[in-house]
Amino acid sequence: MADNMLPTINAERIWQRHLEMAQIGATPGGGVHRLALTSQDIAAHRLLAEWAEARGFAVEIDAMGNMFIRRPGSDPALAPVASGSHTDTQPNGGRFDGIFGVLAAFEALEAVDDAGLTTRHPLEAIVWNNEEGARFVPGCSGSAVYTGAMALDDMLDCRDRDGVTMRACVDDLRAALPAAGVRELGRPLAGFVEAHIEQGPELEANGNTIGVVGGMQGNRRFHVDVTGEDAHSGTTPRAGRKDAFVAATDMAVALREVFWDDEDVVRFTIGQFDVLPGAKSVVPGKASFTIDFRHPSAETLQELGDRVGPVCTAHAGPCHVETHEISSAVPVDFPKPMVSRIAAAAERRGFASQPIYSGAGHDARYLAETCPAGMVFIPCWRGISHNEAERAEPSDIAAGAQVISDVLVELAELP
Ligand code: HGY
Ligand code: MN
Ligand code: MN
């Protein structure tokens, strides 16, 4: 298709849609609190579905709560070409993480529709359920169940901290969108590209607009439970204590040393740390914490990750410790033809671009196991993300959406 035939996205429209979406779950600090399939997240799905219905696009939901918005192609027998990301956020998330990829995908469908273009393959904009894993652990369960990397019933049986199941939340989503069709789980896609803010400083530092993502590092996540004995803080001698906080902090300090590398490539984070009963005059009998470990090397992930259990046991003292591996994902490289296609699309549009590697995890990781997949990054202010101060510029959002639209249109013409 001649370059001048490629539809042009509407920069103002996609920016206004970001501002509208940012109202759903808006926090006083300027961020967004929209945990997976809470009423706020369901409201975001409903708003998107309203926009889709106004366009005459079909809306479907699968058994894992993933939502698919489709613009038909000339050959309905062909698998859809898709783009998308997630609407759920971290507890104090930003206004662009995830939602930019969803709105870039939707804008691509709208630009093609405005241009009156008939594509061979259907085009789809997808909202993957529970990417962040802030409410239901593990994250990316929507895309992982879609691709078969995680089991549907296991993920539907997951409970949040209040004991609510994912299954009940998917039912709530379907009840909120009664007009949505039922999508069978795992229907193949002919290709998938995801747009996302970089969540790192590289593009901004280099003055580039588009990051052509070559791959994504792997991860291993653990939950560590330490059991000691509640005791009176005034009468219990140190020698007689089974202080779970002391044991857990000894473990954390020891783990930080094990995961310390001078090259600063290892990403080791203890993001949740709970102490019970949490009373100032009670020696804690329970402590638990999470480990989020990431690295680009599968061997290092294996070697260092396997040390979590033994290190925790060695520092348990008089307490008992159990380490559970919550989830793991190997590093992924996107197929070269897709990476080149994205780079060429950015080049044709004259966007300053560079190759880049993703430190963050994304749904495209799982899609890459089932179809040609790739990612497009845009800069975010100082690389800040998972933070209410997260910020992206309208011009970069428009550029990212334009590359997504161009790539989707090209893919939709392939046999
Ligand atoms: O944690 C991640 O990498 C993603 O932002 N959920
Ligand atoms: Mn994200
Ligand atoms: Mn995120």
Image (cartoon, grey):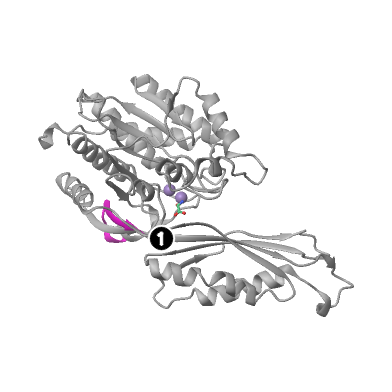
At a point 39% along the width and 54% down the height, the residue shown is 381
Q: In this image, 152 relative to 342: left or right?
A: right
Crowdedness of circle 1 by 10 Å Cα count: few (<14), some, many (20+)? Answer: many
Q: Nearer the viewer, residue 19 or 224?
A: 224
The residue lying at 52 percent from left, 27 percent from top is 174
Where's residue 387, x and y in %? 50, 52
Magenta stretch holds residue 209? yes
Magenta stretch: includes residue 11: no
| Secondary structure under the numbered disc 1 in the rendered image | strand
Which residue carries the number 1 mark?
218
Q: Is residue 285 above or below residue 150?
A: below
Kind of residue indicated by mark 1: Gly
As drawn, 43 above or below 400: above
The answer to which of 113 and 75 lies nearer the viewer is 75
In the rendered image, residue 137, in percent from the top left (x then y), is placed at 55, 49
Q: Residue at x 23, y 30 (%)?
A: 121
- Which corner quadrant holds the C terminus? top left
Residue 118 place in picture, x, y as percent: 20, 25
Q: With 236 as the anchor, is 284 left or right in this view?
A: left
Which of the pair 336/195 is nearer the observer? Answer: 336
Q: Residue furthest right?
A: 235
Where is residue 253 drawn, in percent x and y? Answer: 60, 74
Question: Residue at point 52% right, 30% down?
Answer: 43
Q: Nearer the viewer, residue 155 or 283?
A: 155
Quadrant for the N terminus, please: top left
Locate residue 100 relative to residue 271 in the image: left or right: left
Please provide the residue range marked out in magenta.
205-216
